[in-house]
Image (cartoon, rainbow, N blue to C red):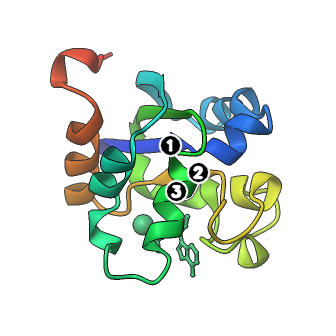
Amino acid sequence: MTERTLSIIKPDAVAKGVIGKIIDCFAENGLKIAAMKMIHMSKREAEGFYAVHKERPFFASLTDFMISGPAVIMVLSGENAISKNRELMGATNPAEAAEGTLRKRFATDIEKNAVHGSDAPETARTEISYFFPELEIVNE
Ligand code: ADP
Ligand code: MG
């Protein structure tokens, strides 16, 4: 089934200059870019995006990290895009991420972990509409 998922190249990976390598990985694995933009989030925008984590001890630090520089926000589409992207990303903690995954290759630590990916169809819909109106997403 063709799905859409939200991907973010987080500020650490943008600063490391690996946007192209990450996008190559998606292209090589059958995920197409249906929307893309680079933004420097405000604290409010980062807090809204990660609202589900607001009670977690790392919330303040995580949202500070997400506003530390620009991030690339994308809608990826493809066969089982949600789980495919999560596979390519690897575990949240790069120390536990499988060899060859984006987090193993590019993350710094459990917080500065290079990429975000939606974890389920419902969160994908919510996260995509948080950043993109339907008019800015291509259907091909
Ligand atoms: P994932 O991004 O793999 O879905 P979570 O949804 O659990 O992981 O967490 C969201 C983000 O919060 C992570 O990608 C990471 O940037 C940060 N994070 C998660 N756990 C921790 C932690 N224990 N300490 C610091 N930051 C964390
Ligand atoms: Mg998550």
Residue 5 in which image quadrant: top left
Which element carries disc 1, helix, strand or loop? strand
- The x and y percentages for residue 131 are 29, 34
Three-letter code, disc 1: Ile
For residue 12, side relative to residue 78 (left or right): right
Q: Is residue 50 visible?
A: yes
Which mark is first along the chain, 1 or 2? 1
- The x and y percentages for residue 73 are 45, 34
Pointer 2 residue: 115
Which mark is first along the chain, 3 or 2? 3
Pointer 3 residue: 64
- Quadrant location, the C terminus: top left
Q: Is residue 84 visible?
A: no
Label 3 lies in ligand 1 vicinity (Cβ under 8 Å): no
Q: At x 51% / y 64%, what residue is drawn?
A: 62
Residue 133 in which image quadrant: top left
Pointer 1 residue: 8
Label 2 lies in ligand 1 vicinity (Cβ under 8 Å): yes
The reply to whether callout 2 and callout 1 are in contact (CB within 8 Å) is: yes
- The x and y percentages for residue 71 are 54, 36
Q: At x 33% / y 57%, what residue is drawn?
A: 47
CA–CA distance in space, label 2 to label 3: 16 Å
Three-letter code, disc 2: Val
